[in-house]
């Protein structure tokens, strides 16, 4: 009887640990090998050719200097932390450790230490996004796309996504807003030409023409974030046409309302008005995104 109680208690503890694992990222799935002399039963050395990259990897850039440094470290000390993989066809698919895998190949290793985990496609996608978001050097544009994917793939609100990755809702919203910038500016941010601070300053205007004009000046003159903010304010001021204050107040209200709706639906919403008539436009970027918006609208209606 006592053994049954202990087994039930152990099982409950395991379930609780699994439930908490996602919030701590992929590190929570890795056994604490340092505290035990014996490796886990699902640990072994795998031929490197049998490991395929993670198909859900949100990170697109792996700096050469970092890979080279890690490769040299692996040559001298080996791989200290095993890679996480799952069984896939006749080989394995990577869950975590792509930098280590790339560096190991560069170092000429033929085998690497791995731990096998059983995990579904949806959980792999979610864990991949969470793990990369929690890394300090995640590219702002990749992070923006990862948040968007987390929201659309798993039908989350911005608040829910923020809670899932341990960030504030405003931080998530700021990254999502990067998707509203013209492609050439997003590329500039991704290549490290512009900082996140510059990007936020450019988002001080929603006019793409003004954003591009400000971006060209920033790149050409090497403007600081404060100088960029002043430039954007000046560009917005040049466009201003003082007219009836009532229309200006109404436009401000509609813009504020559109921002509230954007936060609610987790995507860009615009309100266009002509006289007493107008239209509300809600953007979507895939069939899954459209399904998510329809469900959200139905929930709002009910």
Image: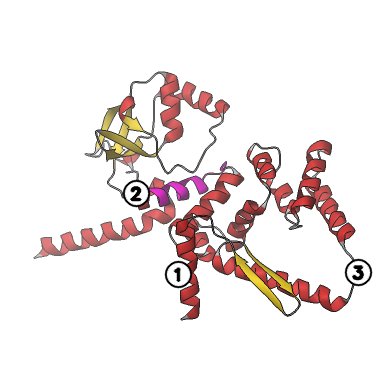
Residue annotated with mark 3: 242
Residue nearer the viewer, 210 or 18: 210
The numbered mark at residue 263 is: none
Give how far apart the Cα atoms at labels 1 and 3 are: 42 Å
Q: Is residue 113 magenta?
A: no
Q: In the drawing, does residue 84 fall left or right of residue 66?
A: left
Identify whether 222 is placed above or below 226: above
Tell me which numbered mark, 1 or 3, is placed earlier along the sequence: 3
Residue annotated with mark 1: 295
Give how far apart the Cα atoms at labels 2 and 1 are: 23 Å
Q: Which residues are magenta?
A: 123-138
Closest to the camera, between mark 2 and mark 3, is 3
Residue annotated with mark 2: 121
Evaluate if marks 2 and 1 touch, with contact meaning CB atoms under 8 Å apart: no
Q: Secondary structure at mark 3?
A: loop
Q: Residue at x 56, y 48 (%)?
A: 143
Q: Position of residue 210 (x, y in %)?
A: 79, 52
Q: Name the dominant secondary structure of the magenta segment.
A: helix
């Amino acid at each position: 009887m006592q053994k049954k109680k202990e087994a039930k208690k152990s099982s409950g503890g395991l379930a609780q640990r699994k439930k908490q694992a996602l919030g701590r990222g992929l590190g929570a799935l890795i056994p604490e090998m340092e505290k035990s002399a014996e490796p886990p039963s699902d640990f072994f050395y795998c031929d490197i050719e049998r490991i395929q990259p993670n198909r859900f990897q949100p990170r697109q850039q792996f700096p050469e200097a970092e890979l080279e440094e890690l490769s040299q470290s692996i040559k001298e000390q080996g791989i200290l932390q095993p890679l996480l993989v799952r069984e896939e066809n006749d080989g394995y698919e990577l869950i975590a450790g792509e930098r280590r895998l790339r560096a190991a190949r560069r170092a000429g290793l033929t085998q690497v230490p791995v731990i096998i985990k059983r995990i579904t496609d949806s959980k792999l996608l979610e864990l991949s996004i969470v793990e990369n978001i929690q890394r300090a050097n995640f590219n702002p544009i990749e992070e923006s796309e990862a948040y968007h994917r987390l929201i659309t793939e798993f039908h989350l609100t911005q608040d829910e996504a923020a809670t899932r990755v341990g960030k504030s809702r405003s931080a998530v919203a700021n990254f999502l807003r990067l998707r509203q910038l013209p492609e050439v500016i997003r590329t500039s941010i991704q290549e490290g030409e512009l900082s996140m601070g510059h990007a936020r300053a450019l988002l001080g205007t929603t006019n793409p023409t003004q954003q591009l004009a400000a971006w060209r000046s920033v790149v050409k003159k090497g403007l600081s974030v404060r100088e960029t903010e002043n430039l954007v304010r000046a560009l917005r001021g040049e466009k201003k046409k003082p007219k009836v204050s009532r229309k200006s107040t109404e436009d401000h209200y509609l813009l504020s309302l559109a921002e509230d709706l954007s936060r609610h639906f987790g995507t860009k919403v615009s309100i266009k008005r002509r006289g007493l008539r107008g239209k509300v436009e809600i953007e979507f970027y895939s069939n899954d995104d459209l399904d998510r918006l329809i469900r959200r609208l139905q929930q709002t209606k009910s």
